[in-house]
Amino acid sequence: MKSGYRVALVGDYNPAVIAHQAIPKALRLSTPDDASVEGVWIHTSSIRDAATDFRGFHGIWCVPASPYANMEGALGAIRYARESRIPFLGTCGGFQHAVIEYARSVCGLPEAGHAETHPEAELLLISYLSCPLLERSEKIVLHDGGLLRKAYGVSPISEGYHCSYGLNPEHEDLIFRNGLRATAHGVDGEVRGIELSPHPFFVATLFQPERRALTGEAPPPVKAFLSALTASGQ
């Protein structure tokens, strides 16, 4: 009998969003043969108390298509995954908000903000990209020893995007401490992926690997996320 697992898909579902179309397929293609995984969409407006709202979930995936209806709810979900050591995956908007949550909660930077939602923030940790990546692909270099490098097995890789905002390079030195590492970069050195150790699995990418599922391919980060989730036995 297969073991069953539940993944919270944190974001505001929109059937017109390509990444949202891809996510159920990505889960299905990436699930280990001896398990079954149910993806449950959690609209950010419904999040009140993460410790209660995410009880019973085995993993949390913060998905694309921000700004979210409830930014604080998304940040609470990310913090819950980080502190509870529940496998976490963030893609696109999930990457952006994982960076903000870590800066605020761990690095003592409560003023860290997102240029799209809080352009007046004292510290614009997430800023407008010099070259927006709207329906574009990019070559990405993965660092040896990282979970992303292990998942893909090769470097560099190429992945697709739909985003205009990323980590502000002026403030990178403020957040890469206490276990948070940049493990994926664009060819010009921009941070495209982060990982947190010694967390069992905490990975976020600015790119959208789930799009691979639309061509019938299991996205490597999603496959690694579900492997960590089923291995944890939580």
Image (cartoon, rainbow, N blue to C red):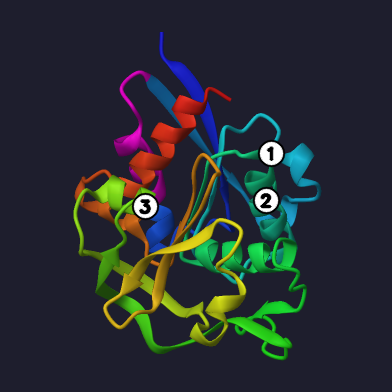
Characterize the local packing of mark 3: few (<14), some (14-19) or many (20 or more) Cα atoms within 10 angstroms: some
Residue 207: % across, % down: 37, 66
Q: Earlier in the sequence, mark 1 or mark 3?
A: 1
Q: Is residue 84 left or right of residue 155?
A: right
Residue 166: % across, % down: 48, 77
User: Considering the numbered disc 2 on the image, is that residue within a helix, a strand or a loop?
Assistant: helix
Q: Is residue 219 visible?
A: no
- Which residue corresponds to the image point at 49% horizontal and 84% vertical from the top-left? 169
Characterize the local packing of mark 2: few (<14), some (14-19) or many (20 or more) Cα atoms within 10 angstroms: many
Q: Earlier in the sequence, mark 1 or mark 2?
A: 1
Badge 3 is on which residue?
Answer: 146
- Which residue corresponds to the image point at 64% horizontal and 85% vertical from the top-left? 124
- Which residue corresponds to the image point at 58% horizontal and 25% vertical from the top-left? 234
Q: Is residue 86 left or right of residue 4?
A: right
Badge 1 is on which residue?
Answer: 54
Badge 2 is on which residue?
Answer: 77
Residue 214: % across, % down: 26, 52
Q: Which residues are magenta?
A: 22-34
> What amino acid is labelled 2 in the image?
Ala
Residue nearer the viewer, 83 or 43:
83
